[in-house]
Structures are given as structure tokens and as C-alpha cells.
Image: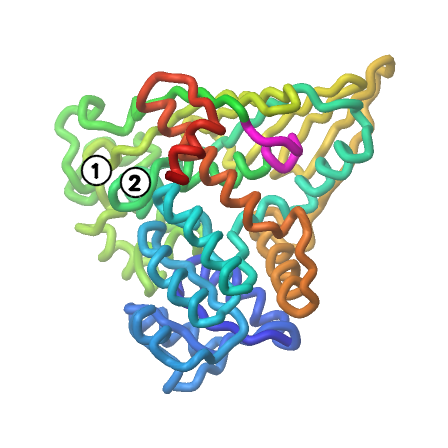
Amino acid sequence: MISAIMIGAGSRGIGAYGAYAELNRERIRFVGVADPDPMRRGYFAMKHAIAMENQFTSDEEILMQPKMADVCFICTQDNMHFVPAKKAIEKGYHLFLEKPMAVNPFDCIELGKIAEANHVHLMIGHVLRYTPFFATIKQLLDSGRIGRLISIQHNENVAFWHQAHSFVRGNWRNRKLSSPMILAKSCHDLDLMIWFAKAHPIKVSSFGSLSHYKSEFIPKGAPKFCMDGCQYAKECPYFAPKVYLNAPDWMKLPVSNDMSDDALLKALKKGPYGRCVYQCDNDVVDHQVTAIEFANEITVAFTMTGFTHENTRTIKLMGTKGEIRGHMDKNILEVYQFGTEAPEVISTVAKSSGHGGGDEGIMEALIALIEEGKNTDITDHNASIESHLLAFAAEESRLSGKTIDFAAYVATLSR
């Protein structure tokens, strides 16, 4: 069994990694927690029977203490990762760092160097590699089922309601407060593309903008807050009470620690999640297309869009002998081989629901990594760092309008 401390008892800390520990107490135990919110800190401590003396209000406080566990989890907001991550590594903790690992490329590279210098394991929360769905795709590619991989079309269908919740009203709405959309939401997907291609990127071009969730589309007479008598309440899909009273817990938790209807309505009245989606301080894109060329000639067309009904990922991988088509939420893969009409249909049902089974899978890989030193291509932090740098390069391309030479871009970061 390994021991752990948690910095940031939010939805991921409580609902993903903490939840795994609750169900697998013989494998991992949380012995310390730090969070400024007394209710979340207390709830996490209660769930994991953490002693009062090991409950802290900040990362500074918990990391001032003598090392008390094998691994430190950092699940705070994106722009709050680097400083405690550096301290935890230097203190000798193995580190599990929620993605994105940092909000600028220099800090990503630095954390990798510090981890190697201190001989600790660094794992980034790229959970999609650990899902049965994407792991099966990887196995099919490696086995040569569709021959040599040539092209990938990959869609991240964010869904209109998820875009509004997380990237218009929520914590990831603004680049200065968090990070660019392609990093905050899509470094998962870029990580998968590198994993599937088995090569380094050489060129990247990206295009996108904030096209809809902005002031020029405010319905005439709509108030700044939904509950201030909005005349469009019945027809608007973003009307806050309609959205959050029927939402899953992971959406309710950022709105209010008390997830009862009365508490949610009170929080929505003048809180950030009760704002009209056309009158927020958001500036991240709501759609973006990224084209990537790899050193082995594989090309990728990746689309992230907030204008979909489904909240899922869909993918098509094309090879010299066939193709693979997949729908993540349906857990279905279709494998077509050239010269045959009917596809082979493969079901990839996950053992648990979190990120299609990825939350459970990454926790099991982390435990094996720490207990047994099982570091493989799937757990190598250098691959995670490269996917972050690819996201930064894509954003650089979007802002500059230029195709980015990836190797040259990375070289500039090392000077």
C-alpha cells in the first residue's frame, strides 16, 4: 500500500482520485489534505480518516511539514500547479499532477528536469491513455491490424452545456485565470495523437476563435444574471436554474458545496454560474482546428468544438490496410479491413465511469509505478511534457497565423 497527500480537494481530488482511494483502501491511503475551503477540506478528511494535525489550509502549510507520504497529488487550478509541484518534488515526494501540468512551456520543462534530478516519479493526469477505449485502439495499431497508420481525424465534442459550464462561466473561461482552451481541455487529445503516432511532431497549424459566447449576441433585454427575470428562461438552453438543478454532482460542486436545490438557487442568483453566457468575462475559444504532421509522415486533423449535442470523443484512424472508427461514449470500435465489406465491431466497456475508466486505470498505473517501478511508455512523463508543448505550439500558431516548426519552437524554450 502507498500513502498520499492531497493538495486541492475539489471535484477531481474528491470525485476521481479520492473516490478511487475510498474503494481501494488496501492499495492507497490519503494521510494529509490541504484546501482553503473548510467544508471541502473537512469532507475529504472525514472520507479518508485524516487526523486533524494533518489537515491544512494551503499547499505552503502542508509542504512545510516533514515528508509524510509516498506521493503528493496536486489538483488545484491550472495556474497554481508549478510552485507546490516544485516544492513537493524537492521534498522527495513522488508527484501526481493534474493536467495541465503548468500554464507556460518553461515550467513544464522545468518540472521534468527537477523530477529527474531528484529521482522521483512524475505522473500527469492524462487519464485517456488508461481507458479501455483508447488502449484498445493502441493495441490494434501496434498489432498492424490496419497496416501502417497514415492519417487520424479526431474530434473532441465538448457539448454546448459543458462549454458554457466550464469555459464560459467556469474556472477555465479565461486564459489569464487558467490557460488556453487547447491546453486546459485538449492536452488529453494531443497526448493521444503522439501516443498513436509513435513519432515526434514536426509541424503544427491551428485556427479558431471565440465566435458565439460574447456580448454581441446578448438577447435583447437579457439581464446579466439568469435569475433577474430573464424573459428567455423557457427557450434558452443555458438558463442557469434549468441547467444546474438537473446537473450531475461534478457540475453542482463548483456552484455550491451544499448541492441541495435551495442552496444551488441561492448561489446562482448572483454567483458566476448564474451569469448570462453572453455576459461573462470569458476569452477562450469555443472552437479550434489543429493540423499536425509527424516525423513519420502521419497527419492529424483535430477538432475541438463547443457546438455539439454529445459530450464525447469520436475518432477515425486510417492505415494502409484498413481503418478504425470509434465513439468513446458508446464504447464501440469498428475495424474495417480493405477488401471486406463488414467491419469487426469491438466493445470496450469500462469497469468504471470516470473518464471512460481512465480515472481508475491511471490510479492503478500510479500505484504500480511507485511500488514496483513499472515505468513504461504509457507512464513516461516526457511524453506528457511533449503533448503540453504541442498545445502551446498550436496556440502560438492560432495567435500568429503561422505554421510552427515544432523542433525549432522547442529549441527556443531551452535557451
Residue appearing at x 33%, y 65% in the figure = 258
Residue at the front extreme of this rendering: 415
Q: Is residue 268 one of those drawn in magenta?
A: no
Vertical relation: 245 (above or below) 229? below
Vertical relation: 73 (above or below) 68? above
**Can residue 283 be spotted in the picture?**
yes
- Res 23 → quadrant: bottom right
**How far from the left and from the top, in percent, is residue 30?**
51, 75
**How far from the left and from the top, in percent, is residue 104?**
35, 43
Determine contact: label 1, label 2, CB under 8 Å.
yes
Residue appearing at x 37%, y 73% in the figure = 63
Left-right relation of 325 to 226: right
Q: Quadrant of the N terminus?
A: bottom right
The tag earlier along the polypeptide, 1 or 2, is 2
Residue at the right extreme of this rendering: 340
Residue appearing at x 39%, y 25% in the figure = 287
Dot 2, crowdedness within 10 Å: few (<14), some or many (≥20)?
Answer: many
Give the labeled residue for mark 1: 280
Magenta highlight range: 194-201
Q: Amino acid at mark 2?
A: Arg
Residue appearing at x 44%, y 54% in the figure = 111
As rendered, which of 52 and 106 lies closer to the eye? 106
Q: In what element is the residue under mark 1?
A: loop
Give the labeled residue for mark 2: 173
